[in-house]
Amino acid sequence: MVIAVLNQKGGVGKTTTVINLASYLAKSGKRVVVVDADPQGNATSGFGIDKMAMQFTLYDALLKKKSAQDVLTLTNQKNISLIPANANLAGAEVEMTNIHGRENLLREVLHGVLADYILIDCPPSLGLLTINALCAAQQVLIPIQTEYYALEGISQLLQIVQKIQANANPTLSILGVVMTMYDQRTSLSKQVQEELKKHFGDLLFKTVIPRNIRLAEAPSHGLPVSEYDKWSKGARSYKLLAKEVIDRAGE
Ligand SMILES: Nc1ncnc2c1ncn2[C@@H]1O[C@H](COP(=O)(O)OP(=O)(O)OP(=O)(O)O)[C@@H](O)[C@H]1O
Ligand SMILES: [Mg+2]
């Protein structure tokens, strides 16, 4: 199953969700491939990989005819491989513009990749890289930061998903919406949660990701939080989210 983790708003917890969801899916025995589709390369460095030292990255697969096998690399986590990214990818959207079938380049790259779950970490935009992720995916997972402007931009995001469903990728669906950086001490968090429940109903995951410093620290050690502090609230919440994802994926 290919899941695009998407929200065009920056800093809402996309990469943190990709890394830690991947980690707990892998721990329950799933073979996971993480695709770093963001020129920031945060998912790449989050697995302790030196993104500037990579010979080949997603860029080479999208635009230089490298195969997925050429660009896939092992991570420090059992059962998780990665297609890395770095700043090279920033130029990709421009270079892709004139290619026929430019929306389906990622889908083609991922065609022969064997995995139980492929998680795509999208950049904070609705540009061509994100469109490629949506055309390659079967499911969309939307992290939303628990803040006053949580829903801002979401209707635009959902419109794009609908457009892709109507044209390029009819089987695309929304796996769910997960609240991130929840602060249980504030009534604002509670309020935003109620609002999101109203808006998304059952699409909202029961698991809520709290604001937790361990989640923010782990990437600087090149580790998922499961390896950095597995008893932290952040770790336990991502473990629960992985369970919910497996349930929803219909296994
Ligand atoms: N639940 C959390 N608790 C505390 N800090 C968090 C949490 N989730 C993410 N962070 C931190 O917030 C920042 C943004 O998170 P992250 O990089 O996952 O967001 P993003 O949506 O991928 O950002 P971008 O749009 O730039 O790719 C990071 O410094 C991350 O470590
Ligand atoms: Mg990110």
Image (cartoon, grey):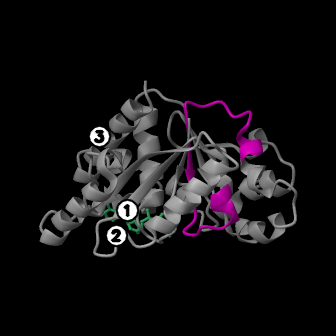
Which of the numbered marks, if any, corresponds to residue 150? 2
Which amino acid is tagged 3?
Leu
User: Mark 2, mark 3: which one is toward the viewer?
Assistant: 2
Measure how far apart labels 2 and 1 are at the Cα level.
Answer: 6 Å
Question: From the viewer's perspective, is 69 left or right of 126?
Answer: right
At which x and y percent is residue 185? 12, 67
User: Badge 3 is on which residue?
Assistant: 240
Chain-order first, disc 2 or disc 3: 2
Which of the numbered marks, if any, corresponds to residue 1? none
Which of the numbered marks, if any, corresponds to residue 144? 1
Measure how far apart labels 1 and 3 are at the Cα level.
Answer: 17 Å
Front residue of this view, candidates 201 and 180: 201
Chain-order first, disc 1 or disc 3: 1
Q: Does residue 57 appear anywhere in the picture?
A: no
Quarter of image, res 67: top right
Front residue of this view, candidates 232 and 130: 130
Q: For the C terminus, give its image quadrant.
A: top left
Front residue of this view, candidates 61 and 158: 158
Label 3 neighbour load within 10 Å: few <14, some 14-19, many 20+: some
Within the magenta stretch, is there residue 118? yes
Q: Which residues are magenta?
A: 107-131
Q: Residue at x 24, y 66 (%)?
A: 192
Asked if the residue at tag 1 contacts the one at tag 2, i.e. Cβ–Cβ closer than 8 Å, the answer is yes
Q: Quadrant of ligand 1?
A: bottom left
Quarter of image, res 123: bottom right
Which residue is most to the front?
Answer: 166
Within the magenta stretch, is there residue 151? no
